[in-house]
Amino acid sequence: MNNLLAIVVKEIKELVRDPKILIGVILMPIIIFPVMGSAIQISQESVQRAIIGASFAVYTDDSGFVTDAFLEYLYNNNTVVPIEAVNLEDALRQFQETDSNALIYIANGYHENITLGQKGVIQVYANLRKLNMAETSSTDVVSSLINIYNYYFGITKIRNLMEDTGAIGTPEAIRSPISIHYYSILKGTVLDIPPMSIFTLVMSQSIMLPIMVMMMVMFAIQMAATSIALEKEQKTLETFMTLPVSRMTILAGKLSGSIVIAIAGSVSYLIGFGYYMNSAFSFVPEATTMSIDAVDIGITPVGFLLVGVVIFVTLVSALAMAISVAVFADNVRTAQSFTGVLITPIMIPAIILMFSDIEMLPQTTQWILLVIPYTHSIIATKAAFLGEYLVVIRSIVFMSAWTLVVLYIAAKIFSTERIITAQFTLGDLGKRLRQR
């Protein structure tokens, strides 16, 4: 036990001592993501300030009480720059000389059309000087302002017509006769909650689980492979193997040390990424203020325990696989090239299942994904969130069987001298292909 602890401590010190691992795996995520999030937040806040302080120009060559009512509405609800011109061309020229990003043109005949029961036409011109978000958003503000006026103006006209004809009903019902009320059925319970609200809530709180598993496995594979490759590259593995320590203890120590660093890197990633999401999307209004407890979904203590088992067996299998492959690399660069091949079948299921369920995919795609062992890790984390523990246990059994197979292969490699003598480079692969 003392030997194993010493090897684990040695492995952690060596991994942390490597600047590429310390900075790239642990420090960079917790630094770069907050910086990126803060930068996006500053940019969005500047856009919001520009929109709030923006003004728009108004030009009309029409007259009448309907036109005057619309102008009064515009002047009372925003900063308006009036344009006095002889025609529309002159108005557009003056508009481009102002600081306004949008011009509202009330064309001649607007008052007459409205009073005759026809549609009045309003033209909006956007002056896109720098093609930034503030300019396009300012136009959206103008459109929203006009749409609000259009709605209440329509309600007023309908009410007047109803009073003149003695019609029964409300203006709102006549303008929009159909009202949709959404309900959701979750775990057999009918909830007075729109399904999109629940979907948004679930996505915001469950999407990090597949990301966490994927990032932990990727970190673990890279570090385990780098550790073995460094030992071989620096010729210290031969000395290490001559010590009076069993090969299985060495393998267990390397696996344990890499797991500790992988977990630290994953925590760093989640903290940094969480700050990035909060900062980058802080300008988006909250879709719902529901608590996760309100819909009786989430991860219970039993679910957390099962997810912990899933992550553990996933990490052990990934580390053992990375160590087994890295044995055949003679330097760090080659080992990292090998790990790129191992990471691909981990990223694909995580990306696909992050936004979809396995049952929604075509049958052939389902079988292909189910053959990939790490698909079951993603399925298990999502099932734990919904309380489907039988699915989680099934995934644990499958992953445990796969982990035993990978550990058996790693143990076989470590029990022979192949761990020292085995070498395989990308150049060797090219030579063999040319020979064929």
Image (spheres, helix red, strand yellow):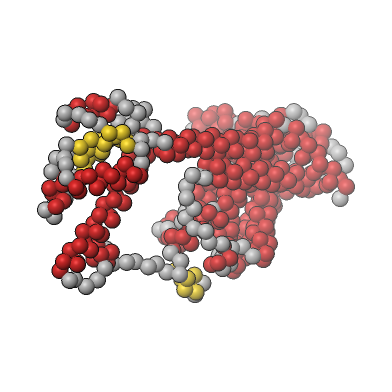
- Closer to the camera in the image, 74 or 330: 74
The residue located at (22%, 30%) in the rendering is: 84
Whether residue 223 sits left or right of residue 235 in the image: it is: left
The residue located at (25%, 59%) in the rendering is: 155
Tell me if I can see residue 258 in this picture.
no
**Taking 99 as reference, is 350 above or below it?**
below
The residue located at (24%, 47%) in the rendering is: 69
Tell me if I can see residue 181 in this picture.
yes
Q: Position of residue 327 (x, y in %)?
A: 68, 38
**Taking 363 as reference, is 269 above or below it?**
above
Q: Position of residue 431 (x, y in %)?
A: 54, 29
Please give the count of numbered marks on the rendered protein: 0
Whether residue 182 sits left or right of residue 291 in the image: it is: left
Q: Position of residue 329 (x, y in %)?
A: 65, 34
Whether residue 17 sits left or right of residue 54 in the image: it is: right
- Closer to the camera in the image, 356 or 419: 356
- Closer to the camera in the image, 41 or 239: 41
The residue located at (42%, 58%) in the rendering is: 361
Q: Position of residue 295 (x, y in %)?
A: 53, 67
